[in-house]
Image: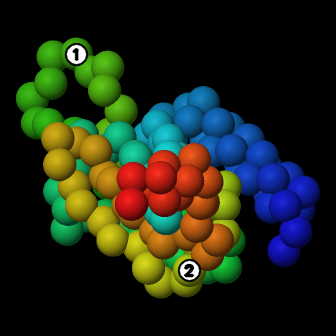
Amino acid sequence: MNEPVLARLQHLMTLREEVETLGAGPWTPAADWADGDAHLTLYLDVPGIDPERLEMHEDGGLLTVAGERAAPQGLLSAERPAGVFRRVLSFPREVLPQTGEAQLAGGVLTVRFQKKHPTIDVRADVQDMRDR
């Protein structure tokens, strides 16, 4: 798919997620993408989620992450969202299929993918040549 189509699809998925969260429906964890030289990294806030309750599926230029956070018993008041979530994210850069490596620490799911076209830092290469 071309980038404008993927961007439009991502926008539509975001709107759908926002509509779902208006009521007592699913919640949406915050997500950030970071672009490294050879890798693209996703950071997704999922505090309180058991790793066994997380699912990830990669399909073309889209990554789906889903899970569930149970509400604690005996709450006197509740501000933190609970229940199921599902995020469909488009990759902001092309990645090599099925290269995702995930880890969960401190309530943040970090998934690192190999970029299809690594970024070359010409300045670093020139400096390396000078140092030789």
Q: Note whether 44 is above or below 23 in the view shown.
A: below
Q: Which mark is residue 77?
A: 1
Q: Which quadrant, please, contains the C terminus?
A: bottom left
The spot of residue 108 in percent (x, y) is 28, 44
Furthest residue in direction left, as rendered: 74
Residue drawn 46% across the image and 68% down it: 113
Q: Residues within 10 Å of mark 1 (few under 14, many from 20)?
A: few
**Dividing the picture into quarters, in which one does residue 14 lie?**
top right
Query: How much space separates mark 1 and mark 2, taking CA atoms?
Result: 45 Å
Furthest residue in direction bottom, as rendered: 98
| Three-letter amino acid code of the residue under disc 1 | Ser
Residue drawn 22% across the image and 55% down it: 104
Q: How many marks?
A: 2
Q: Residue 132 or 71: which is nearer the viewer?
A: 132
Q: Secondary structure at mark 1?
A: loop
Q: Which residue is mark 2?
A: 96
**Dividing the picture into quarters, in which one does residue 67 lie?**
bottom left
Would you say 25 lies left or right of 108 here?
right
Q: Note whether 26 is above or below 67 in the view shown.
A: above
Q: Residue 21 or 51: which is nearer the viewer?
A: 51
